[in-house]
Structure formats: structure tokens, C-alpha cells
Amino acid sequence: MLDTIWMKIVAVLQAVQGGMDQLLAPVDATAGPAVSIFLLAVGVVLLTSWFGRFKTRRYRELEGEFWHWFHVRQAALEAGDGQDDQKSALAKNIDKAKLNEVYYNYFFEGLLNNLLTRYIPIMLVAGYINTAYRPEALMASTGQKALFALPLGSDPVTVGGVFWYVCCLGLAALLRVGLKRARRRGNAPVGEVEHAVSH
């Protein structure tokens, strides 16, 4: 049974890889593999940003519970006849009773949520790039084993597919942040824009 499931998973992955090869073939032929990898990185950043908006119901419940107990702890620190020892002891009891438990559940639920919506898509595309743009495939399609070479010193530094993908991910993320900030400034009232510029 497990062998059958695994074979189906492999078949699906091969079909997806074949579809990606056909989709990127025109870009590879006209602009080159480096541009294809850049477009993949941009697509991954946009896709994971969109996926990141969706949170599980348990995550939202744990988030609300965490902030509830956090505010209870803050109120406990501010309470109690001005005696720091009493405040500290009460806050510690609240930590032991509920806040730590809720925090760890909230943390791990957020980690699982990010794993599904961010890290797995990034790693899947990295695996595809590692296969589709490996040195042998690049040699067959472009006549060289790397995407390009950087003339640093006497020996040029060659850039492979996965390294270029990581660089493109960082660049795409920075571009996304810059566009969001520019959009916020464009939507801000005139007074807020003038205040931001003056400071």
C-alpha cells in the first residue's frame, strides 16, 4: 500500500515537473535560465505571501488566548499595593499556570502554519531548480555548466541554479516590501506624508 502511494506521489511530481519544463521552455530559449529562475522566485514570494494570509482556526484561537493571558500577566504586574515581590510572584504564578503553555502551543501552531504556507513551497521549487538546472542540464541546453560567472579575481566565480534562486528570493522579498511601503505612502493623507518627509 505504501509503495502504491509513493509511486502515485512520484508520478504527480514528475507530471508537475514536466508541466514546469514546458511552461519555462520559451523563457529559457529567449531570455535564459537565469530569468526563468528569477520568475520562479518572484512567483514563490507572491504565492507564499498570499498563502500566509490564511491561518488555521486553532492558530487564531491560540493567538487570542495568548494575548488574553499576556494582558492578564501585565495587569498582575501593575496590581498589588506597590509591592514588587507580590507583583513578581503573581506574574510568575500566571506564567506557570497558563501563559507558558499557551505560548508554546501558539508558537508550534505558527511554525506548522509557516511550514505549510512558506517553507514547503520554497523547498519544492528549490528541488525543481536543483533538478531542472543542474550542471548537466545546463551544459546540454546552454553549453556551460553554470548560469553565469562573476569576474572576481583571477578565477571567475560560477553561479549555479539554487544559489541564484536564493539570491532572487531575497531580491523579490525586498522588492515586495518596497512596493508595499510605496503603496502605503501613496495612500497616506497629505499631512502624514509631509510629516514622514520632514522626519
Image (cartoon, helix red, strand yellow):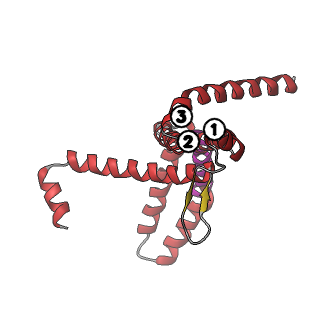
User: Gap between marks 1 and 3, in whole Å?
Assistant: 9 Å
Of marks 1 and 3, which one's residue comes earlier in the chain? 3
Q: How many marks?
A: 3
Q: Which mark is residue 115?
A: none
- Under tag 1, what secondary structure? helix
Disc 2/disc 1 C-alpha distance (Å): 9 Å
Q: Is residue 106 magenta?
A: yes
Look at mark 3 in the image and give the residue it sits on. 29
Q: Quadrant of residue 136?
A: top right
Q: Which residue is mark 2?
A: 33
Residue 189: % across, % down: 15, 49
| Residue at image mark 1 | 141
In this picture, residue 197 sits left or right of residue 30: left
Quarter of the picture holding the C terminus = bottom left
Q: Nearer the viewer, residue 182 or 64?
A: 182
Describe the element under mark 2 as helix, strand or loop.
helix
